[in-house]
Every structure is written in C-alpha cells, then in structure tokens.
Image: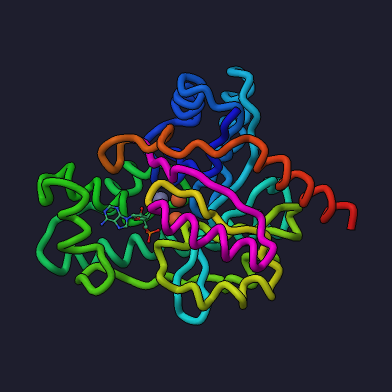
Amino acid sequence: MFTDLHLHTNFSDGTYTPEELAGHAHRLGFAAVALTDHDTMEGCARMAAASAAHGIEFIPGSELTCEHEGQELHMLGYFLDAANEKLRVALAKFQGVRVSRIREMVARINALGVKLDVQLVFDIANCRAPGRPHIGRALVKIGVCSGLDEAFDRFLKKGKPAWMPKYRMTAAEAIELIHQAGGLAVLAHPGLYRADHVIPGLVAAGMDGLECIYTRHSTPIIEHYLLIAEEHRLLVTGGSDCHGMNKGQPLIGTTKLPYHFIEKLKARVAARRAG
Ligand code: AMP
Ligand code: ZN
Ligand code: FE
Ligand code: FE
C-alpha cells in the first residue's frame, strides 16, 4: 500500500483536473493521495469525490507559500478543514496577492514591447491561485517563447525583468494557520532550499514534519533529511510534486511512500485535536 502526499491540479499550476489525477492514482495503484495545490483548497472537494469513486483515501491539503528570515519556503498543510474561517480568509487574501502580482508582471512584460493580454493569462489559469507558470504558458501560446523554461529564463525567474516578489506570510504564521484549521504543518522539499539552518526555528514554531522523500531528492539527500527528522522528532512525509504535463513527464508514480507513514500522521492529528 502506497501514497503520494504532494500533488497539484489545474486549481493551481498543475495541468490535470482532479478527476484525471485520481484516475492516474488509481492506475498506479495508490491507496491514498493528498492534494496540495498552492495557496488554495479549491480542488479538494472534487478530488475527494474522484478519489472515493476509485476507492482511494483522500487527505485534503494545501502548499502554503511563506518565508522565514527572507527565505521563501513552502509549508504543506495536511488534514485541513477547508471550511475553517481563518484559513478561508487567509487563502482568499493570498489569492488576491497572486492576482495583483500577475497584473503587475504582465505590465512589465508589456513594457518590454511584448503584447501579452493579461486576460489570456487568467483564462489559462482559470483558478483563484494564478502563478508564473500560467504567464509562461500564455507566452508559449502567443509564440513569444518556445517553452516554459524559456519563459522563466527570459522573463519570470528571480532577477529577470518581469519577476516580482509577492507578499508572503511568515512560516510561523503558516504553521499557526494550519494548526488552527486542524491540520499538520510539514516543510515541503527541504532539499531545494539549501537552508537547513531554518529548520530549528520552524520546529520551535511547532512544525510537525519534514518532506524527506521527494522526487528531486537524491538518496543521500533523503538520508540526510531522515536524520534531521529523527533529531527533531519530526514526522516524515513524501510525495512526487506532480504538476501533470507541465514539466515534461508527469511525476505521479515516481515517489511511492509506504502507507504506514499516514498512520503516524493520523495519530498526530488525533493527539492534537484531543488537545
Ligand atoms: P509562483 O507561485 O507564481 O512564484 O510560481 C512558482 C511556480 O513556478 C512553482 O510551482 C514552480 O514549479 C514553477 N517554476 C519555477 N521555476 C520554473 C522553471 N524554471 N520552469 C518551469 N516552472 C518553474
Ligand atoms: Zn507548483
Ligand atoms: Fe513547492
Ligand atoms: Fe508543490
């Protein structure tokens, strides 16, 4: 029995619908999946229904953009109550920040002489959490870039002309938001930040786990983070971070976390909810 606890749909920057994603999970034999779209839980209701139709257990989640000492971090929330009022308000706010940022980034691209209609970006995104990949897809669609990589390299990467920082909550705020919505806070893909020094501060803020098993973590990196998790008594999670066909091959199926890791997460959720 296996699970994948890091997946995106077209409710953020993935390309699969929830139904397509659940279909792939079924084909690959997953017993459980979590949906972790960026700064939104919009896709969770459909993903729950589509998973149930295949007999797959579903864990509602989200990947919250935040920062700690200037470092952008992604905090995964699991077992979140999508109806939680504070969480709904916070997600709406960060979705608003994403929308204004898209407008500003497209204005910068226009200022470079590229005729890109911001409405095309919003049409492609077709969700409340638009991001840079949607601008990239629009640039490819109008023939300005040959692919997403070129769009990031020429316009969208940090330091490139259209790049803009976006207002982010702190990691401590993200952890608190996740906890008050009944969830567990897990640091996504620690191997991508080169910022292990932030981990003790996050543990002090109450973070529950570390995503040690991850498609882009090599075996030595996985072992490195398993040791750190043990040292700080953190839960261990894992996932593929599949975005559908966005980045060439779909990643779902490349990371198969044994199901028993979920039992530990559930025990921690139950303990926290019991006070
Ligand atoms: P945003 O949330 O708007 O800052 O966009 C971040 C998203 O862009 C992440 O989900 C990344 O997967 C994606 N991304 C970052 N760099 C690249 C790149 N070079 N090529 C394609 N996608 C990227
Ligand atoms: Zn993404
Ligand atoms: Fe991420
Ligand atoms: Fe992700």
The residue nearer to you, when weighing 113 against 33, is 33
Position above or below: 219 against 198: above
- Where residue 93 appears, as percent x and y from the top left, is 56, 62
Say if residue 92 shows up in the picture. Answer: no
Q: Say which quadrant the N terminus sits in.
A: top right
Find residue 91 and report its horizontal and vertical position in percent. 58, 57
Question: Considering only vertical position in the picture, is 274 above or below 24?
Answer: below
Is 225 part of what is drawn in magenta?
Answer: yes
> What colour scheme does the image use?
rainbow
Let me know if residue 258 is in the magenta part. no
Q: Is residue 132 visible?
A: yes
Question: Left or right: 92 with respect to 164?
Answer: right
Is residue 208 placed above or below 7 in the rendered structure?
below
Give the residue at x 61% y 31%: 32
Residue 100 location, quadrant = bottom left
Magenta-colored span? 217-244
Q: Quadrant of the C terminus?
A: bottom right
On the picture, is 138 further left or further right than 206? Answer: left
Q: Left or right: where does residue 156 sit relative to residue 231?
A: left
Q: Position of residue 114 (x, y in %)?
A: 12, 59
